């Protein structure tokens, strides 16, 4: 049966997974990088070789563009194989992704994809986590895409900031999650 | 029972089994279902119903004949834990890619064209702890919505094979279920 040390490790690993998705959706490269060790490697289909966390964070944040173009990464199933004593874990996490693609996200597009589409995808992160100095972070990440779907925006294209009034989603400190946080600078 | 910590451990185990089921189905690692169900467990869903071993044989055949990629994404999980029994509701968004050559019968009936069936559903489970082992004694699936569309995968077609999910991947995701396989 599970013991508390393993559950504690799971929670810490889960927090790192959440820092990653919050970092990407809020375009915060520092938060994104905090899910990884600095010497980690990240493998993606749309990049010719593996990346460092610093390179990946830069590419992801610039590649997704600024709001109001949203992205959402919904983490769902997470399966862990953890060796607590050894400080290593293999982790599979499912993610449901919604994000726009268009000229502003040209790094992930072919030139002929000039329009603005919404992309909906199911993917899995296959991660090697390690615990170093008491902290669990990603040492190696591969992102595998199981399926995807690309649709044109409706007409007119949804502009979330018009619908949401004062609570428009934003990047980094401009997002309500930061503004409303009790940790926000007063 | 039970202390708060014991309840926490049990809930973690129940969540783990909900996820193990999804992994087993999506990767076609049907042997893993041994860990999800008790021997006499009953399963009921649109595609097949019955005692779990009969059910899994039928589902495995349906998946082989009808489906490409599937992806079972589990979201909300409510657990009512009462001693050695737990009733749970788990939400799931289930993606199914139906093959062009699928037989023209059943839930995933073939049309001659590839298409997607995406469903929102809930698993209503009764977990039981028998001889110290938690597993599902009964699983009922209720479908809340279903969406069927032609495939439109955009630039996923340009993704190299090693970065696309594979139903029978022998290596990529094996490590995360290593201790269940051994």
Image (spheres, coloured by chain):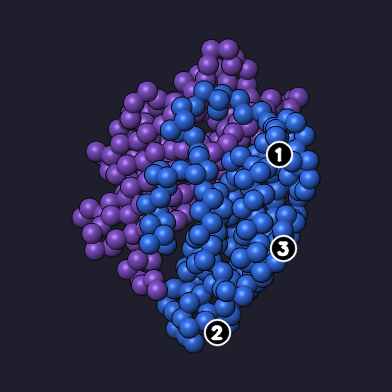
**What residue appears at the point 44 percent right and 73 percent down from the top-left corner?**
B9
Q: Give me the chain letter of mark 3.
A: B
Along the line of sight, the residue nearer the viewer: B135 or B57 = B57
Can residue B167 be seen?
yes
Q: Could you tell me how far apart the alpha carbons at marks 1 and 2 are, in whole angstroms?
A: 45 Å
Q: Which mark is residue B49?
A: 3
Q: Residue A16's x, y, as percent?
A: 38, 50
Q: Could you tell me how far apart the alpha carbons at marks 1 and 3 are, in whole angstroms?
A: 20 Å
Residue B10 vertical placement versus A156 (above, below): below
**What residue appears at the point 53 percent right and 16 percent down from the top-left corner?**
A110
- Asked where in the image residue A161 lies, by quadrant, the reply is top right
- Asked where in the image residue B125 lies, by quadrant, the reply is bottom right
Q: Which mark is residue B102?
A: 1
The letter of the blue chain is: B
* Quadrant of the drawing holding the N terminus of chain A: bottom left
Q: Residue A29's x, y, as percent?
A: 38, 35
Residue A19 vertical placement versus A58 (above, below): below
Quick check: do tags 2 and 3 share a chain? yes
Indicate the colour of chain A: purple
- Asked where in the image residue B182 lies, by quadrant, the reply is bottom left
- Cβ atoms at labels 1 and 2 below 8 Å apart: no
Q: Viewed as shown, does residue B130 lie left or right of A90?
A: right
| Camera-nearest label, 1 or 2 | 1
Residue A47 vertical placement versus A13 (above, below): above
- Mark 2 crowdedness (10 Å alpha carbons): few <14, some 14-19, many ≥20: few
Q: Give me the chain letter of mark 1.
A: B
Q: Could you tell me how far apart the alpha carbons at marks 2 and 3 are, in whole angstroms?
A: 28 Å
């Amino acid at each position: 049966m599970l013991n508390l040390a393993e559950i504690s490790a799971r929670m810490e690993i889960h927090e790192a997974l959440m820092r990653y998705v919050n970092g990407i959706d809020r375009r915060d490269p520092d938060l994104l990088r905090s899910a990884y060790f600095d010497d980690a490697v990240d493998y993606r289909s749309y990049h010719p070789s593996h990346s460092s966390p610093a390179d990946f964070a830069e590419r992801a944040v610039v590649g997704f563009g600024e709001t109001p173009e949203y992205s959402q990464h919904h983490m769902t199933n997470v399966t862990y194989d953890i060796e607590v004593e050894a400080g290593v874990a293999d982790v599979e996490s499912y993610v449901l992704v919604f994000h726009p693609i268009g000229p502003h996200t040209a790094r992930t597009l072919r030139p002929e994809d000039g329009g603005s589409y919404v992309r909906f995808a199911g993917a899995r992160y296959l991660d090697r986590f390690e615990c170093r100095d008491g902290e669990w972070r990603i040492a190696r990440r591969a992102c595998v895409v199981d399926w995807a779907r690309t649709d044109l925006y409706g007409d007119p294209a949804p502009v979330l900031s018009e619908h949401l009034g004062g609570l428009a989603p934003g990047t980094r400190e401009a997002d309500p999650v930061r503004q409303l946080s009790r940790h926000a600078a007063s | 029972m039970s202390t708060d910590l014991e309840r926490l451990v049990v809930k973690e185990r129940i969540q783990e089994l909900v996820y193990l089921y999804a992994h087993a189905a999506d990767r076609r690692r049907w042997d893993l279902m041994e860990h999800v169900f008790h021997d006499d467990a009953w399963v009921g869903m649109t595609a097949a119903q019955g005692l779990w071993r009969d059910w899994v044989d039928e589902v495995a055949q349906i998946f082989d004949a009808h489906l490409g990629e599937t992806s079972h994404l589990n979201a909300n999980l409510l657990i009512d834990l009462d001693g050695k029994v737990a009733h749970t509701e788990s939400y799931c968004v289930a993606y199914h890619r139906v093959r062009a050559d699928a037989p023209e019968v059943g839930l995933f009936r073939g049309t001659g064209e590839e298409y997607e069936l995406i469903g929102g559903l809930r698993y209503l489970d009764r977990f039981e702890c028998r001889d110290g082992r938690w597993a599902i004694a009964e699983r009922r699936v209720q479908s809340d919505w279903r969406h069927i569309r032609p495939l439109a995968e955009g630039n996923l077609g340009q993704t190299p094979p090693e970065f696309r999910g594979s139903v029978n991947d022998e290596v990529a995701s094996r490590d995360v279920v290593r201790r269940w396989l051994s």
